[in-house]
Image (cartoon, grey):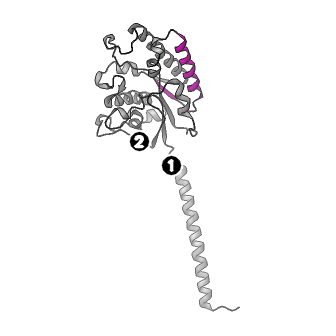
Amino acid sequence: MSTTPFARRRFIAAGSSILLSALTSTAAASRDERDARAAPEPFTVYTFGDSILDCARYNEHGVHPGELLVRNDDRLFPDFKGQDLQSHGPARLVHRAVDGATVDGLPSQARGLAPPGRRAVALLTVGGNDLLRGLAADTGAGVRAFEAALARFVAGLPIRPVLLGNVYDPTLGDDRRNFLGVDASIARANHRRVNDVIAAVAARHGQLVDLHGHFLKGDPSWFTRTIEPSLRGASEVRRAFWAALQSRTGPGSAA
């Protein structure tokens, strides 16, 4: 079959267009792949535990410490402008903490976690609800069981480091404000024992964040509903964890 010169030119032009399109697509795909490889891995903050980290429902703005660490609300907390992870690079939050949680509920919070990246930190607060539900009056066995459960959870957590916050004191050291229905001397002794357990686990697997000591420097406005972090309290929890992040080598200190 013979073809005219015009038809041959159309055929050649069409072939050239297809080839050019294929080359352009290949180049774009290669460029996207290079860009993906060059993009820095986001620093991931994981939160586990109780309402100290899951306190959004206790303030009118619905904020909690984990999100403030990743991205500060400059309108609410202008003194923290630039003091968040996203001000210094890509960062994201995986929020697993649940208001009301005890140590026995921690494994369910970690269920189904995707493998963490190289740039990650876990924040954990637990123990307050355990004290409220019986450990404040414990005679020994309960705190030992708490220690075993906490150590088992943290040892199996695939994220390092782990920053463990201890249990603050909503009475600010004033026995007249005791709300537990347990003699204050007994409750305070068990509070110390729980915090000693948290400190020991933190020493093995990460770092202690002394919320107890930090909140003793505060005032009742840091609390709401007797025991929960208020809006100011949420920011103060963030302040304590931010200081711990900055004290470490790696992403926290870089931020």
Amino acid beneath label 1: Ala
Is disc 2 surrounded by few (<14), some (14 to 19) or many (20+) residues within 10 Å? some
Query: Is 249 displayed left or right of 77 in the figure?
Result: right
Amino acid beneath label 2: Gln
Q: Is residue 162 magenta?
A: yes
Res 180 quadrant in image: top left
Residue holding disc 1: 39
- In the image, the segment drawn in magenta is 139-166
Query: Is 33 displayed left or right of 223 in the figure?
Result: right
Residue at x 32% of width, y 19% of height: 217
Residue at x 55% of width, y 50% of height: 37
Frontmost of labels 2 and 1 is 2
Residue at x 48% of width, y 13% of height: 193
SS state under label 1: loop
Label tally: 2
First in sequence: mark 2 or mark 1?
1
**Alpha carbon distance from label 2 to label 1:** 15 Å
Q: Position of residue 181 (x, y in %)?
A: 39, 12
Res 58 quadrant in image: top left
SS state under label 2: helix
Is disc 1 surrounded by few (<14), some (14 to 19) or many (20+) residues within 10 Å? few
On screen, 28 above or below 177?
A: below
Residue at x 52% of width, y 49% of height: 38
Q: Position of residue 203 (x, y in %)?
A: 52, 20
Q: Position of residue 67 (x, y in %)?
A: 40, 37
* Between 27 and 226, the one nearer to me in the picture: 226
* Between 125 and 134, the one nearer to me in the picture: 134
Numbered label attached to residue 207 = none
Q: Is residue 132 magenta?
A: no
Residue holding disc 2: 86
